[in-house]
Image: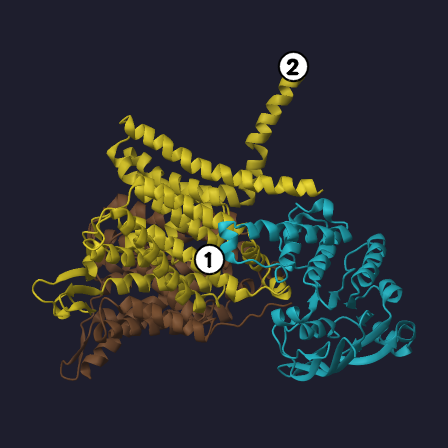
């Protein structure tokens, strides 16, 4: 039975290799198709956002699936990562002209700031449970978005100036430069993101999350999710591990924010990119991909982002279709009727039956 | 000082709208134990029905409001029957995602019918404003109607739950639906009724909201919906007086925050107050404390 | 010196005195039973001993150390592990991983080591696997190591809970109704296992049980609790023949 155990280990390892493989394969196929010139510019423009969503979905799965906490404020951490890194890149554009090094540092800064916010938000929030935790994370996300919208930050020969009112009250010298311009955000962030960088960041995210889950720390986190009281009784530090999972998740969302920010010429905090709607959209990816299922999150993020685009011919009806697909999927997968239906007409059974009839012949 | 009083009155008025929405939220949560994210969008539908019947077809406002209440009630029951009922035993997350789907659905139906342009809503209130302190404070007809409506609804709802058979059935189901069923309460009918009442209230809230803030788009309901939910949590979700108090407080904080601190940060202030309240009292102002048994 | 010494322990919930003036002395290596009718406060005593509830009065000494009012995890680290009346496993984890969570504080590597898969990760994980399999074997669960814990039959779930508790290397093991829901054959087997655990691990065991066959079969000493107070205590055979105890169970 020791061998059986080793076999089981191999099974998870195999499954993880498949996950990495899917990502790499998707990249290669897209590269080839792009070289061949058969990819529409619309789809090309979607590639980096797709990578962003995949990272967000995988990282949120760490909070929702692995740690078992319903967070509706994930976009807030993405916002922190986006703005802190874009600010850095804009300031350092002349100091560090090599875009690779600058972007690498920007990623570290975005991740670090988002992690910091993860700790600050996590300490109070993780004392709450269930729906209360959900609404408070939503509240934190909205606060981050709103506060970013009133920050004016500029630089002149005397150093940095900040105001919460308007650009004028910073009292910049005439040759001073406004870096963060309130609701207009940051303009002119160097365009350092591209598809390859996105794919690499996805792979790093996967590496961190998958290895974390299959480690001593991951087991502790999942034990707390499954039974808090029992976990405490065997000496697991509840707050420590909950906060750790939440912080890593926030930090990776920050990385997604860095990728997002360096793909745009203008970065502004709006409801559609950093509001609760975005957090909900990521949650939809996680739930439809299967709670706790990392590969599922990736596939759901890609399919659900592409779906409205593929339905573009339906014009105004596409978002309506999206809504119907969402409701129908949930009823199909989670209702007793839907589950019975799936069992009766499952692919495996249909294939099995066909085999049987063949044998009978 | 006069400024403060008129801000306060405006705050109570906005808070009354939140309170009416929050009542619907809190009742549904108490009974179905679900976050009905689509509740805010029912408000928007309520607004559009009145817009169509009154501004479009020229019907008298009272008829328009009645039609709106009927449409929303039926809509609420339909949503419950089609989308939520099959998921009674499903995980909380599955129900939440379905509710989000319903929310998208309602927004996009409205988008298809009315387009994304802002419609200017004609107020249904024709009461002349009251002028106090020699005109230093003017209280609009909408404000008066909103506050009065909220108080009437609050009293009627409390009486209904306390004294009617169906109301007590609601209480029983929210306490323990399994036990209620064994005692002969029709749980499905009670849940449907709760959705009906909640949606009817949403229709009224929609009309009142659009009368005071006359810009109507398919997304009009989303933010008030979220805020009303915050109000419900604030007061202690599942508690009817809690929803009322939470709604009023939230409206007042929002308007005062807008007036004295920053109009852009008003929402942030509202959310910050929620966080502080929940950290001090994790189940809201009037919420019940539940301890896990080992 | 006794392994566990409890004096004047008490707790009130509002006006209700759930446990009052409770005392208990357990020697190293003893198999001790805590019995009493339903609602007598037995599980409350366990919850007090493991820090789930903070006592309002009295003190608890474990191996001479005062652990009164400490948190659950601290008490576990001091050496008390427990099982639960209503089984509390990590349902989504495998049987093996359930035990490995129990080993958490005895086999350590940092989170970063785990993420980066440094050599130490493989070394410690291998040791943990070996130790966990050893424990599973004691409870005849080694064949099911890769099952999801929630897929185990009821009797095996109870055993897994004991294995997980033992993994934390306690000095004192608390078992809350270990035979509940088991058939006579399973109970018989469980008795053997409990005795084996005591002998093999030199474990001290305190258990709550309603199954009198199990209690009289393996417990050396008993304390009887009734309405939150000690009714009587002493050697098993003496206590079980005490008319006071029989009255408490059967009513007058």
Quadrant of the rendering where the C terminus of chain C is positioned: bottom right
The residue labelled by disc 2 is: A361
Q: Nearer the viewer, residue A105 or A314?
A: A105
In the image, residue A177 above or below residue A320: below
Q: Is residue C69 left or right of residue C184?
A: left
Q: Chain of mark 1?
A: A
Chain identifier for the brown-coloured part of the image: B
Q: Residue drawn at (62%, 82%), measured in percent from left and top?
A: C14
Query: Label 2's element?
Result: loop
Q: Residue drawn at (36%, 68%), measured in percent from left and top?
A: B19
The answer to which image quadrant residue A25 occupies is: top left
The answer to which image quadrant residue A185 occupies is: bottom left
Residue B153 percent across, percent down from the top left: 38, 69
* Nearest-to-viewer mark from 2 and 1: 1
The residue labelled by disc 1 is: A70
Q: Residue drawn at (58%, 36%), measured in percent from left and top?
A: A343
Chain identifier for the yellow-coloured part of the image: A
Scheme by which the image is coloured: by chain
Q: Residues within 10 Å of mark 1 (few under 14, many from 20)?
A: many
Residue A214 percent across, percent down from the top left: 55, 49
Are the residues flagged by discs 2 and 1 in contact, CB closer than 8 Å? no
Q: Residue drawn at (42%, 65%), measured in percent from left and top?
A: A119
Quadrant of the rendering where the N terminus of chain C is positioned: bottom right
Q: Nearer the viewer, residue C126 or A339?
A: C126
Chain identifier for the cyan-coloured part of the image: C
Query: Label 1's element?
Result: loop
């Amino acid at each position: 039975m020791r061998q059986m155990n080793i076999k089981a280990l191999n099974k998870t390892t195999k499954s993880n290799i498949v996950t990495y493989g899917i990502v790499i394969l998707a990249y290669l196929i897209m590269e080839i198709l792009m070289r061949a010139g058969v990819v529409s510019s619309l789809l090309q423009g979607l590639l980096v956002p797709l990578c962003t969503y995949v990272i967000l979905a995988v990282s949120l799965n760490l909070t929702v699936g692995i740690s078992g906490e319903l967070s509706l404020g994930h976009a807030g951490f993405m916002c922190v990562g986006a703005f802190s890194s874009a600010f850095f890149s804009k300031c350092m554009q002349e100091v560090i002209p090599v875009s690779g090094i600058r972007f690498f540092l920007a990623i570290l800064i975005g991740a670090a700031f988002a992690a910091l916010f993860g700790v600050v938000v996590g300490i109070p929030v993780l004392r709450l449970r269930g729906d209360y935790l959900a609404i408070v994370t939503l509240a934190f996300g909205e606060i981050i978005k709103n506060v970013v919208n009133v920050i004016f930050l500029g630089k002149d020969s005397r150093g940095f100036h900040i105001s919460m009112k308007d650009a004028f009250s910073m009292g910049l010298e005439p040759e001073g430069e406004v870096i963060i311009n309130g609701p207009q955000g940051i303009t002119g962030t160097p365009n350092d993101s591209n598809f390859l960088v996105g794919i690499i960041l996805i792979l790093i995210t996967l590496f961190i999350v998958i290895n974390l889950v299959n480690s001593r720390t991951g087991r502790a986190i999942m034990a707390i999710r499954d039974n808090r009281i029992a976990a405490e009784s065997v000496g697991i530090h509840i707050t420590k591990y909950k906060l750790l999972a939440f912080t890593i998740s926030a930090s990776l969302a920050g990385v997604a924010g860095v990728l997002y920010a360096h793909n745009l010429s203008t970065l502004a905090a709006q409801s559609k990119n950093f509001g609760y709607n975005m957090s909900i959209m990521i949650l939809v990816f996680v739930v439809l991909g299967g709670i706790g299922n990392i590969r599922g999150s990736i596939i759901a993020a890609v399919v659900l982002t592409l779906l409205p685009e593929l339905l573009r011919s339906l014009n105004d009806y596409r978002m309506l279709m999206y809504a119907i697909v969402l409701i129908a999927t949930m009823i199909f997968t989670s209702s007793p009727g839907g589950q019975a239906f799936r069992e009766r007409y499952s692919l495996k059974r249909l294939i099995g039956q066909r085999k049987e009839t063949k044998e009978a012949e | 000082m006069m400024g403060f009083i008129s801000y306060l009155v405006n705050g109570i008025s906005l808070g009354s709208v939140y309170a009416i929405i929050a009542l619907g939220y809190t009742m549904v949560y108490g009974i179905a134990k679900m976050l009905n994210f689509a509740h805010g969008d029912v408000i928007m539908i309520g607004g559009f029905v009145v817009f169509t019947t009154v501004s479009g077809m020229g019907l008298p406002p009272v008829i328009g409001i009645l039609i709106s209440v009927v449409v929303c009630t039926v809509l609420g029951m339909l949503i419950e029957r089609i989308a939520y009922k099959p998921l009674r035993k499903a995980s909380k997350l599955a129900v939440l995602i379905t509710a989000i789907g319903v929310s998208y659905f309602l927004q996009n139906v409205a988008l298809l019918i009315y387009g994304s342009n802002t419609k200017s809503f004609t107020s249904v209130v024709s009461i002349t404003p009251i002028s106090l302190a020699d005109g230093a404070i003017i209280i609009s007809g909408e404000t008066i109607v909103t506050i009065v409506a909220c108080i009437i609804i609050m009293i009627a709802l409390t009486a209904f739950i306390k004294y009617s058979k169906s109301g007590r059935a609601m209480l029983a189901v929210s306490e323990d639906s399994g036990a209620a069923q064994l005692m002969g309460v029709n749980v499905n009918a009670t849940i449907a009724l709760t959705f009906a009442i909640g949606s009817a209230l949403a229709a009224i809230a929609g009309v009142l909201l659009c009368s005071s803030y006359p810009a109507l788009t398919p997304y009009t309901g989303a933010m008030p919906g979220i805020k009303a939910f915050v109000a419900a949590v604030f007061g202690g979700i599942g508690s009817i007086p809690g929803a009322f108090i939470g709604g009023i407080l939230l409206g007042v904080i929002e308007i005062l925050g807008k007036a004295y601190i920053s109009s852009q940060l008003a929402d942030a202030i509202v959310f910050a107050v929620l966080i502080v309240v929940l950290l001090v009292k994790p189940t809201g102002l009037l919420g019940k404390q539940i301890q896990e048994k080992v | 010196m006794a392994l566990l010494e409890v004096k004047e322990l008490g707790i009130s919930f509002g006006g209700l005195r759930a446990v009052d003036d409770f005392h208990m002395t357990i020697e190293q290596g003893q198999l001790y039973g805590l019995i009493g009718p339903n609602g007598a406060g037995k599980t409350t005593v366990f919850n007090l001993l493991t820090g789930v509830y903070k006592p309002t009065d009295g003190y608890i000494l474990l191996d001479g150390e005062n652990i009164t009012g400490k948190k659950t995890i601290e008490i576990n680290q001091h050496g008390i592990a427990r099982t639960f009346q209503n089984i509390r496993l990590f349902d989504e984890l495998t049987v093996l991983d359930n035990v490995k969570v129990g080993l958490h504080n005895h086999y350590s590597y940092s989170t970063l080591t785990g993420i980066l898969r440094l050599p130490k990760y493989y070394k410690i994980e291998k040791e943990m696997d070996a130790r966990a399999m050893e424990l599973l074997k004691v409870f005849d669960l080694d064949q099911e190591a890769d099952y999801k814990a929630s897929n185990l039959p009821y009797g095996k779930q109870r055993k897994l809970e004991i294995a997980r508790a033992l993994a934390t290397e306690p000095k004192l093991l608390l078992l809350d109704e270990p035979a509940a829901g088991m058939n006579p054959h399973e109970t018989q087997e469980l008795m053997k296992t409990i005795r084996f655990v005591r002998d093999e691990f030199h474990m001290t065991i305190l258990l709550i049980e309603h199954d009198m066959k199990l209690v009289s079969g393996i417990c050396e000493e008993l304390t009887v609790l009734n309405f939150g107070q000690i009714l009587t205590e002493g050697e098993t055979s003496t206590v079980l023949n005490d008319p006071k105890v029989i009255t408490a169970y059967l009513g007058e």
